[in-house]
């Protein structure tokens, strides 16, 4: 399996190094053949090549079996004007990675303020209120006068259908419950269509239960009783916000792993940003990217890569759980290990099996 590895900005390189240590241990333990190809991205790429993301990387990733993208400091980029493009948007759009799968679960050994839970947010990734990916050319955010901005949200039936399909397929492998989160009481046409698609797809999955929750009420429901939820499907921005909440509810944003999946490509990516406030200090939690890499291995395995990749993904998650239970974790989880030591503790547990 060839994986293109792009470390990114801020804490990106640190959590990527720790993730690669876990992948190398997994490769040995499971007899996998992993070809990990590192390429530069983000501000370092801009310094070396005049752009935060070199266009040829798209073909390189297409020809590979997957990619790992570290977080980038996109808020600091002078978007578009000087070769500073958002790499995440570039790959999600360029590779049509429409499903952003963001699991959130508690782990034994950590205080679970809201009780134990295990859920997954399935977020549409290619349209919605993201002005930078809604148009064939140009941007869907328009400065009408110096004091008036119009931001357009695009919702299409085909994108609603495929994200609903992805959510139901996932639920069928889990607890067989899908919750569609929407604002159809106000966004009657757009979210109305999203709900219509969820109901339509539900008909093909008679063993999966669908319920529907309005997004603002969802914030209360998910905090009050996260155990109620299994797979949550929603449009782009709602999913972006909700999944940071559920990651933090699980104990730390540093536990938020995610996979961006399309039909033929997938990208492992932490749910959080580049955390400049803690960058370069060896204190960031690498688990987010480690769990993301585990999701990528499982995805590859399920698509014909072989059962050993699915087993390897599960083994990484188990090693993460064991490390947390043993207190071998970073400061955000109440531990005292640095980023690399926390990664090494997980790698060691994968090795031991
Ligand atoms: P952030 O997600 O980087 O950080 C929010 C808080 O969570 C900070 O206190 C940070 O220290 C903490 N945190 C995040 N990851 C952690 C980890 N692995 N371990 C421990 N603590 C962690 O959000 P921000 O500060 O608003 O954004 C910083 C930069 O990241 C901005 O430039 C933003 O545009 C960018 N960003 C990038 C992505 C991406 O690359 N996918 C996503 C979101 C934000």
Image: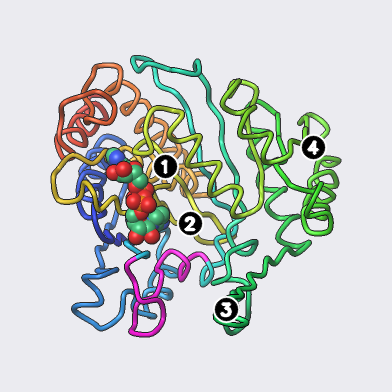
Residue at the spot 56% in from the left edge and 41% down from the top edge: 242
Q: Earlier in the sequence, mark 2 or mark 3?
A: 3
Q: Residues within 10 Å of mark 2 (few under 14, many from 20)?
A: many
Q: Quarter of the image holding residue 232?
A: top right
Question: In front: 102, or 267?
Answer: 102
In front: mark 1 or mark 4? 1
Cα distance between the residues tagged 4 and 3: 37 Å
Q: Is residue 87 magenta?
A: yes
Cα distance between the residues tagged 2 and 4: 25 Å
The colour scheme of the drawn protein is: rainbow
In the picture provided, is 184 more to the left or to the right than 308?
A: right
Q: Which residue is mark 2?
A: 266
Residue at the spot 50% in from the left edge and 18% down from the top edge: 114
In front: mark 2 or mark 3? 3
The circle on residue 302 is none
Q: Is residue 251 above or below residue 306?
A: above
Q: Which residue is mark 4?
A: 205
Report helix, strand or loop for mark 2.
strand
CB at disc 4 and ligand 1 closer than 8 Å:
no
Cα distance between the residues tagged 1 and 2: 13 Å
In the picture provided, is 329 more to the left or to the right than 59?
A: left
Q: Residues within 10 Å of mark 4 (few under 14, many from 20)?
A: some
Question: In front: 299, or 338?
Answer: 338
**Total count of labels:** 4
Q: Earlier in the sequence, mark 1 or mark 4?
A: 4
Residue at the spot 26% in from the left edge and 83% down from the top edge: 50
In front: mark 1 or mark 3? 3
Q: Which residue is mark 3?
A: 139
Q: How far from the left and from the top, in percent, is residue 134?
A: 62, 72
The circle on residue 257 is 1
Tell me the magenta residue range: 76-92
Residue 1 in view (yes/no): no
């Amino acid at each position: 399996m060839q994986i293109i590895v792009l470390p990114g900005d801020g804490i990106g390189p640190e959590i990527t190094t720790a993730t690669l240590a876990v992948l190398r241990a997994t490769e040995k333990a499971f007899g996998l053949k992993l070809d990990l190809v590192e390429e530069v991205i983000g501000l370092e790429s801009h310094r070396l090549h005049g752009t935060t993301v070199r266009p040829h990387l798209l073909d390189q990733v297409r020809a590979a079996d997957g990619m790992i993208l570290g977080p980038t400091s996109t808020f600091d980029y002078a978007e578009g004007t000087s070769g500073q493009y958002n790499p995440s948007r570039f790959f999600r759009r360029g590779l049509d990675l429409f499903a952003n799968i963001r699991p959130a679960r508690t782990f034994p050994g950590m205080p679970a303020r809201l009780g134990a839970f295990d859920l997954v947010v399935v977020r549409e990734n290619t349209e919605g209120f993201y002005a930078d990916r809604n148009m064939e050319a140009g941007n869907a955010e328009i400065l009408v006068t110096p004091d008036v901005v119009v931001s357009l949200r695009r919702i299409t039936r085909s994108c609603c259908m495929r994200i609903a399909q992805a959510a139901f397929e996932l639920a069928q492998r889990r607890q067989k419950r899908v919750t569609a989160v929407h604002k159809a009481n106000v966004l009657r046409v757009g979210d109305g269509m999203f709900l219509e698609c969820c109901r339509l797809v539900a008909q093909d999955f008679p063993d999966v239960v669908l319920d529907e929750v309005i997004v603002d009420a969802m914030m209360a429901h998910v905090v009050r009783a996260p155990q109620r939820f299994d797979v949550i499907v929603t449009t782009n921005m709602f999913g972006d916000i909700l999944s940071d909440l559920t990651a933090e509810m699980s104990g730390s944003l540093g536990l938020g792993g995610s996979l961006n999946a399309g039909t033929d490509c997938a990208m492992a990516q932490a749910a959080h940003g580049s955390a400049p406030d803690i960058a370069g200090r060896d204190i960031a939690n690498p688990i987010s990217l480690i769990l993301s890499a585990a999701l990528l291995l499982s995805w590859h395995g399920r698509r014909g890569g072989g059962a050993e990749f699915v087993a390897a993904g599960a083994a990484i998650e188990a090693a993460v759980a064991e490390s947390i239970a043993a207190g071998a974790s970073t400061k955000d989880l109440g531990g005292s290990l640095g980023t690399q030591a926390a990664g090494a503790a997980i790698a060691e547990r994968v090795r031991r099996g």
